[in-house]
Amino acid sequence: MIRATLATISALLLLALPAQAAEDFIAAPTLRASVIVTSDVVRVGDLIDNAGSAALVPVYRSPDLGTTGALPVAHVLSVLRAKQVIGVMTGDIKEVQVTRLARTLANKDLETAVASALERRFGLGEAANIAVTFDRGVADMRLDASNTGALQPVATRYDARNGRFDIAFEINNDSNPAPTKLRFTGTAIETVEVAVLTRDIDRADLLKSSDIALERRPKAEVTGEPASRDRSIGMQLRRPMRAGMPIRVADIVKPDFVSRDQSVTVIYQVPGIYLTTRGKAIESGAEGDTVSVLNLQTKRTLTGVVTGRGQVTVQGASQSAPMAPAVEQTSSLKRDEAPAPVDTAALVRNLVQPPASQAQVAQAQIPQTRVPQAPAKSE
């Protein structure tokens, strides 16, 4: 009977309170299972809901930046009681996870910031081509989460002789009017992407895709224009080179399709005529080069263009044998005049018939004359 009376009285008192007072009366402090903080201390209001006037009271030191710590519930309640916070509802929570937020500056981000501060200054080029190495091996850096500003370089020094840099940065802080200051030192060197050999290559070897890799090298180490990987594949080197050496444009040439003293196919070509014979190359040449070849049948030396592997094409006027008169006269034809027929036999003789011997030439050019002999004197 007494218990029922007390319950009735409590209900009547509750109905008589203002709405806000009733809410405060009902809300009880409740422990949180997971806590996220941004400052270096954990306060009562971080650990429990409905902390009231005790919310700003500090109770723990926060975990390290970017890390999470665990607190047993019994320990938390003991600390809260010491701060005059009692009647905390814990439910079935066994421990409280406390995470401290942080802003992480990755090593790569710091390298990019330094390269950007040096870009197109002190004789350096694009930031993407600047390789940065920090003193003391700077790793990822964690800052308080309130440091939300961008890395702004405020002082930059660079020595082009040895590549040393000394750069100071500032980061705006949301909770502090004074910006956070950072300073980095190290070396910064401009690099270029070059094709390098993956194995020793001889002069006669053709460069294959597996023979070439791309690497970044200090620009000062690469003299001349570096050759691209695509441009190098299928080419030959001007000289033997060892693995790891960078390839320059001056180091590569088109592959020789014809080698000196090689047996080649000689193609003689004029409009309407296509003849082939065997010859020997007098000099080496790549596709498109002009070389001299010896016609093995006529022993004549011809000049032609390398048009394929072991193949030299001699265009009419480019070979040493004289053109037939019928071909030469076509240059003086009138507009409506039909061209004279090509003397095919003469062209073939120029290509395939051996030249006359020196004795025959001399005999043809110097006619013989008879010298009259003086009559014999009579005694």
Image (cartoon, rainbow, N blue to C red):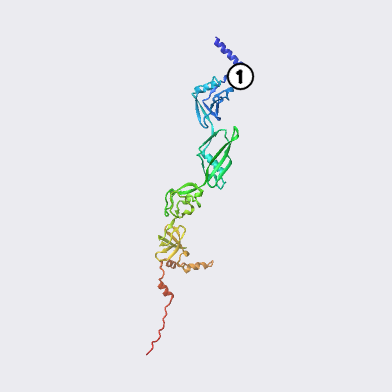
Q: Nearer the viewer, residue 212 or 255?
A: 212
Measured as percent of width and height from the top left, residue 236 is found at: 44, 54
Q: Quadrant of the N terminus?
A: top right
Q: Quadrant of the C terminus?
A: bottom left
- In this view, the residue farthest toward the left is 379
Q: Secondary structure at mark 1?
A: helix
Question: Which residue is drawn at the image coordinates 59% and 22% (left, top)?
Answer: 53
Measured as percent of width and height from the top left, residue 145 is found at: 56, 33
Asked whether residue 6 is in view, the answer is yes
Measured as percent of width and height from the top left, residue 282 is found at: 42, 62
- In this view, the residue farthest toward the top is 1
Circle 1: is it few (<14), some (14-19), or many (20+) Cα within 10 Å? few
Q: Nearer the viewer, residue 290 or 83?
A: 83
Q: Identity of the amino acid at label 1? A: Ala
Question: Which residue is drawn at the image coordinates 55% and 11% (left, top)?
Answer: 4
- Above or below for 321 versus 36: below
Asked whether residue 130 is in view, the answer is no
For the image, the number of numbered tags is: 1
Q: Nearer the viewer, residue 31 or 285?
A: 31
Q: Nearer the viewer, residue 197 or 16?
A: 197
- Above or below for 319 versus 54: below
Measured as percent of width and height from the top left, residue 200 is found at: 42, 50
Residue located beneath label 1 in the image:
21
